[in-house]
Amino acid sequence: MIGAAALVSGGRVLRPGWLRARGGRVGEAAEGPPPRTPDLDFGDAAVVPGFVDMHVHGGGGGTYTTGETDEILRAVAFHRRHGTTTTVASLVSAGPDALLRQVRALREPVAEGLLAGIHLEGPWISHGRCGAHDPSVLRDPDQAEIARLLEAGEGSIIMVTVAPELYGALEAITALTVAGVVVAVGHTDATYEQARAAIAAGARVGTHLFNAMRPLHHREPGPVLALLEDERVTVELVGDGVHVHDGLVAHVAADIGPRRIALVTDAMVAAGMADGAYRLGSLDVQVTDGIARVGATGAIAGSTATMASLFERAVRRLPGPVDEVLVAVTDMTSSTPARTLGLDDVGDLVPGRQADWVVVRDGRVREVYRRAQPVGTD
């Protein structure tokens, strides 16, 4: 049993709150003083659900791209220490054979529960909005290739980003949706109508909204407005102060509500590492002052953020009463991404869910627990 000054559970802040875990799952969670002396008393801290990062390429010197076990373990361990108890491994665009190898290499860590799934952020994206993806491997969606990847993944591919203006994109979105894969609109130069058509075909996520997509314009609002105005869509925001201005994050949160926003790191191998030269997929990346950019083009190449840093930034910068903000940020870092991806075992501290929690003081992550067991923190 644990106790704390505040426990976020079921969309509420319980003050005080307590939780009893059984077999790595939440058995009970309630408001008020604990019924007995707790095994762990977190005092004046707030306990929130473990973070769910639905878009991350690596970190701590490890990457998911190679499929090497030690790299995967390094990246997962790094992000766990920073509160991410559930990780989706994002892959950048690659050639058909390379992508197939990467999916096959990651399916076992997914089956073992180390990763929650695989996100293919390409290769079916726009050349003009490719960002930190190698333009030489981008291509139109091919149903045969999609079928091969889904077969190789054995259910581990849970999200795919597609640019809806590409030839065959709408058919691909439909096929992926029917297969149970969440489809995201991103890295796209789509018009407003093309984005709406993608949503009608089944797309339900906006990949890092505003970044690598046609910008909002008063005569051609493009994909941004289409994604924001449809309440079936969850939008990702890289809320690190680099990808999106803090004021815009607050505006979007006020406009559509936190239950439609997933804060994501889009972190790459250099997260938690020193400035210097790195690689993202096949591209050379230079990190300066913590900002990663493609060496050849200067395009932002993912981030060096952690979910802990995004949580702290959002708690400190979103307006509103303390408890209201705490619930909103918990939605954006835990429950919304879990619900969007159909991960009904995580994302909230309610009976039956996995007992993953983060201990927060003054907005900062102090301790992390996964399946009720402590995870080392930096």
Image (cartoon, helix red, strand yellow):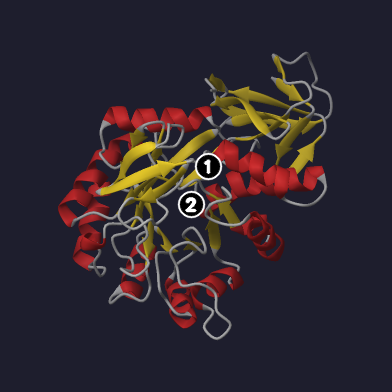
Q: Does residue 3 appear in this view?
A: yes
Earlier-in-chain disc, 2 versus 1: 1
Tell me if residue 145 comes above or below residue 99 in the rendering.
Answer: below
Horizontal side of residue 368 vs 71, given as left or right: right
Q: Position of residue 187 (x, y in %)?
A: 39, 64
Q: Secondary structure at mark 1?
A: strand
**Which of 216/112 is in front?**
216
Horizontal side of residue 330 vs 148, given as left or right: right
Tell me if residue 84 comes above or below residue 70 in the rendering.
Answer: below
Residue identified by numbered label 1? 52
**Which of 296/258 is in front?**
296
Which amino acid, by three-letter code, is at mark 1? Val
Q: Secondary structure at mark 2?
A: loop
Q: Quadrant of residue 279?
A: top left
Disc 2 from disc 1: Cα separation: 10 Å
Residue identified by numbered label 2? 341
Tell me if residue 64 comes above or below residue 81 in the rendering.
Answer: below
Cβ atoms under marks 2 and 1 closer than 8 Å? yes
Camera-side mark, 2 or 1:
1
